[in-house]
């Protein structure tokens, strides 16, 4: 007991005299101000002492409980390069700062504030494309709106990163930015190809929802029931803006070997979900593109996996939904993003290798709709041809879920926030590089 008390005293002494300028500001600048600054999604700025001091106790509570910075991966599984958890010593520094009165300290000790270019987290983009109009968002209902615009690129561009920037954060819930393969694809809704000739979807105001009388497949791993898109994968968006998600970085190794491609003269589509507000709003969302400095070795690919045909019973507190993906060729897995709505409870990703080994890639035991995080693997994981990714979500449709809009209602897939989704977005590379890429074409 004496040794423990002495050790605790020494540890406490190490953090004594903590000040904002010398000790706390460096922690906030590194981990927090990407969101906690004027014009960003966080409710207050932490860039300077005057702004941060009124929130000192709230900051302590948030970091001690690990509510902030947001990070929901179970530490027992996987290693992630963007792990946002604060170091224990950083938490102790903030605790000591608050305990000693949250003093400012010597202004000379304050490090240089991070600089951000007009809301662009990655600095000034090489090219900015917007939706082409000041769109008037009608009040009173969710709206899903498509905007198709021309890039005006005279030559193909390899892109190392992209940042979708909402024009009006009050009303823009999320955005999918896609490169259209051809002229005709601009008018094609994703749901058109899902039902293999039978319409299982209702569409209103651009928002789709699975019909109540559609087939129910909660466990797509046990069989797809002959329904298209309950096996295999779908090619995902070029870039996304989601609540709590940062910009898309394609140069994942930082050496220019990986990028995404936009062909010359391509058209692009912004698919925007506008949330319901009581008053009309105006939005002009844009995307900032950052060009690669050289032709990459391999293109980064989005592989999406969904189960659209679940049914969550009214009042169910732990409803399970599954989807499997049979790996059709050797791939390297780089990142995983689980996506659900307000009833999403947890998500687990398991890889069953060809030799029968089972490996949990990611476990998110406490999913939060407000923070849809992309979990970027520290080291790529080889998914061999013939292996199987098993995705398991649980949903809480009970009255004990404070975010649940209506626990008395059975829930199906839908675009509206009050509906539900079971989606996985992954980033992958072909395990073996194909023939060399060129500056003007993307080799599939």
Image (spheres, helix red, strand yellow):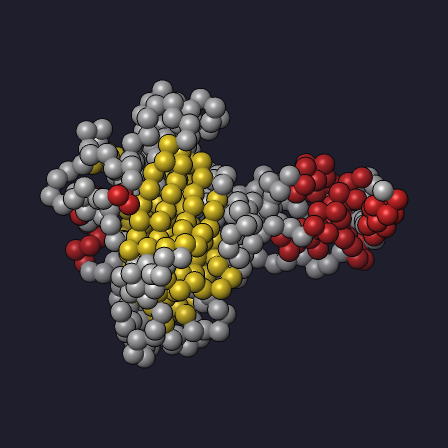
Residue in the foreground of this view, choosing between 32 and 287: 32
Residue in the foreground of this view, choosing between 348 and 294: 348
Task: Give the x, y percent position of residue 105.
Answer: 82, 50
The answer to whether residue 272 of the structure is visible from this angle is: no
User: Which image quarter holds the N terminus?
Assistant: top right
- At horizontal 39% and vertical 74% (from top left) the residue drawn is 296
In which image quadrant can residue 54 be found?
top right
In which image quadrant can residue 134 be found?
top left
Q: In this view, does 241 lie to the left or right of 105?
A: left
- At horizontal 45% and vertical 67% (from top left) the residue drawn is 251
Q: In this view, does 266 lie to the left or right of 139?
A: left
Residue farthest toward the top in the current orientation of the protein: 408
Residue farthest toward the front in the current orientation of the protein: 356
The answer to whether residue 90 of the structure is visible from this angle is: yes
Task: Give the x, y percent position of residue 123.
Answer: 52, 62
Q: Is residue 226 above or below residue 258?
A: above
- At horizontal 44% and vertical 36% (from top left) the residue drawn is 345
Task: Give the x, y percent position of residue 283.
Answer: 39, 43
Task: Give the x, y percent position of residue 42.
Answer: 57, 42
Residue farthest toward the left in the current orientation of the protein: 197
User: Which image quarter holds the C terminus?
Assistant: bottom left
- At horizontal 19% and vertical 33% (from top left) the residue drawn is 214
Q: In this view, does 324 lie to the left or right of 89?
A: left
Residue in the foreground of this view, choosing between 87 and 2: 2
Q: How many marks?
A: 0
């Amino acid at each position: 007991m004496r040794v423990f008390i002495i050790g605790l005293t020494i540890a406490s002494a190490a953090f004594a005299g903590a000040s904002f300028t010398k000790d706390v500001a460096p922690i906030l600048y590194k981990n927090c101000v990407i969101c906690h600054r004027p014009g960003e999604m966080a409710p207050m700025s932490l860039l300077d002492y005057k702004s941060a001091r009124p929130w000192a106790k709230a900051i302590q509570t948030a970091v001690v409980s690990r509510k902030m910075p947001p990070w929901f991966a179970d530490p027992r599984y996987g290693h992630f390069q963007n792990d946002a958890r604060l170091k224990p010593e950083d938490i102790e520094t903030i605790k000591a700062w608050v305990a000693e009165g949250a003093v400012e300290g010597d202004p000379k000790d304050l490090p240089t504030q991070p600089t951000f270019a007009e809301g662009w987290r990655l600095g000034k983009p090489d090219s900015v494309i917007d939706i082409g109009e000041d769109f008037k968002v009608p009040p009173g209902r969710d709206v899903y709106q498509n905007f198709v615009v021309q890039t005006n690129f005279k030559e193909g561009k390899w892109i190392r990163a992209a940042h979708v920037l909402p024009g009006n954060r009050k009303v823009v819930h999320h955005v999918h930015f896609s490169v259209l393969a051809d002229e005709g694809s601009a008018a094609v809704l994703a749901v058109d190809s899902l039902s293999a000739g039978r319409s299982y979807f209702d569409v209103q105001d651009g928002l789709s929802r699975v019909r109540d009388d559609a087939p129910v497949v909660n466990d797509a791993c046990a069989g797809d029931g002959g329904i298209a898109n309950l096996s295999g994968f779908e090619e995902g968006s070029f870039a996304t803006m989601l609540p709590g998600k940062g910009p898309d970085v394609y140069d994942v190794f930082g050496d220019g070997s990986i990028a995404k491609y936009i062909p010359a003269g391509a058209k692009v589509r912004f698919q925007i979900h506008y949330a319901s507000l009581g008053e009309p709003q105006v939005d002009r969302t844009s995307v900032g593109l950052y060009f690669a400095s050289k032709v990459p070795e391999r293109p980064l690919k989005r592989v999406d996996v969904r189960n659209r045909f679940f049914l969550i019973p009214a009042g169910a507190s732990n409803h399970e939904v599954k989807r499997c993906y049979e790996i059709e060729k050797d791939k390297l897995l780089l990142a995983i993003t689980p996506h659900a709505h307000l009833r999403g409870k947890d998500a687990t990703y398991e890889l069953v290798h060809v030799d029968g080994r089972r490996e949990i890639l990611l476990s998110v035991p406490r999913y939060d709709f407000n923070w849809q995080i992309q979990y970027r693997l520290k080291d790529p994981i080889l998914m061999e041809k013939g292996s199987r990714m098993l995705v398991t979500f649980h949903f809480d449709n009970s009255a004990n879920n404070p975010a649940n809009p209506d626990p008395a209602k059975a829930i199906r897939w839908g675009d509206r926030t009050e509906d539900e989704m079971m989606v996985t977005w992954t980033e992958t590379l072909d395990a073996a590089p194909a023939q060399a890429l060129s500056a003007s074409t993307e080799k599939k």
